[in-house]
Amino acid sequence: MNDDVPAWIRATYLVSAAADEIDAVARGLATEQSVEMPLDAITDRRVLDEVAGRVEAVAERAPGCYAVTLSLAAETVGNETAQLLNMLFGNCSLHDAVRLVEVELPQALLASFSGPRLGIDGLRQLCGAGDRPLTCTALKPQGLGAAALAALCERFALAGLDFVKDDHGLADQVAAPFAERVAACQAAVERANERTGGSTRYVPSLVGSPRTLTRQARLARDLGVRAVLVAPSLIGLGAFRELVDEDLDGMAVLAHPAYAGAARVDPPLLLGGLFRLLGADATIFPNVGGRFSYSAERCGAIAEQARRPWAHLAPCLPVPAGGMTPDRAGEMIGAYGNDVMLLIGGALLAAGDRLDHEARRFVTAVADAGA
């Protein structure tokens, strides 16, 4: 950053407040998210001019609902992910009436983030998919042993799916310990690929403390794994960025939305924007009409945030999921286009003896819809 020209982050919040109170509330947000003390008690001119937050705009979105845009000093971030979140939505996240919806970073700060390492093109190359939509499924349920999960993995790979991921609930559990499960599932996929000539990728779930995550990532890499699943909100966004930067070089990263609803950060910003900023190559989110109550507009906004041009950051692949079925493949590809990965898990597993048939039907439906 140029020390002579202060750089500012622009952050926009949706705030519920009465019309005669919103200006005071906005000023309070600016103070709370910056110097966190009365401005008239600050005597340092530089702090007042270059560090204290500013209210840039207040716009009514609906009766009692306002978009408040603040400028926050970029120097307060110090290039730390946790501190960025602290400055964007630290104390103010404690207010029930405030939701963070948009963030614009100054160029110098944005340049310090690498974003997706593979992006959409890299994911396509990883599984030899050309320009068609990608396919994915999930290994379930918790409680199955490693051999049973590996058997499912092999069947899905033989059917031609691009990615077979752990359910995010699979961890280092007694029924299927991480090392045993990953070794068995990776070997199963490799056997299937040898038979079919395909490039299915097994995607183990990494979860735990930072040291555990590093250990799991290195074990997966040593076993030949090329893609992993991580829930950034569960492990912490700072730990997620560090994991991607230091332990997952060259590996695809699928971001799972578990625990992402625990904070009032707008899903398009969090799942499509911040996860991408911190290194997710693909972002999973609840699709409209599934088990969760996301609207078509919200889903479209997540995909837009994930794929839109954004400085040097590679685009992130949207992955609509959550109770989807093969019959909806055409509808989803029509909504999102070919730059999408469809994730269908339970509907395939529920097919029982027809699992292989349903998995192949899913692959065919996606290929046909994307042609």
Image: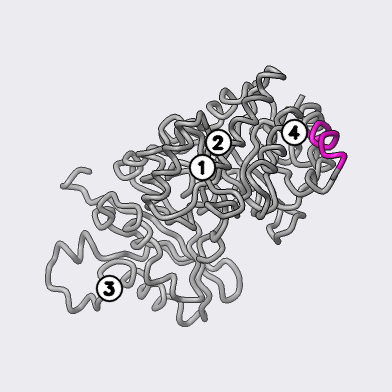
Read off the residue under disc 2.
Answer: 183
- What SS does tag 3 mark? loop
- Between the C-alphas of marks 1 and 2, the distance is 6 Å
Q: Nearer the viewer, residue 350 or 365?
A: 350
- Closer to the eye: label 4 or 2: 2
Colour scheme employed for the rendering of this structure: one colour
Read off the residue under disc 3.
Answer: 36
- What SS does tag 4 mark? helix
> x%, y% of residue 341?
66, 37
- Would you identify the image quadrant in which residue 202 lies? top right
Residue 355 on the magenta segment: yes
- Would you identify the image quadrant in which residue 127 lies? top right
The 10 Å Cα crowd at callout 2, few under 14, some 14 to 19, many 20 or more, is: some
Please report the bounds of the magenta region as a residue range.
353-362
Above/below status of 144 relative to 189? below
Read off the residue under disc 1.
Answer: 179
**Amino acid at circle 1:** Ala
Of the image marks 4 and 2, the number of the one nearer the N terminus:
4
Above/below status of 174 relative to 221? below
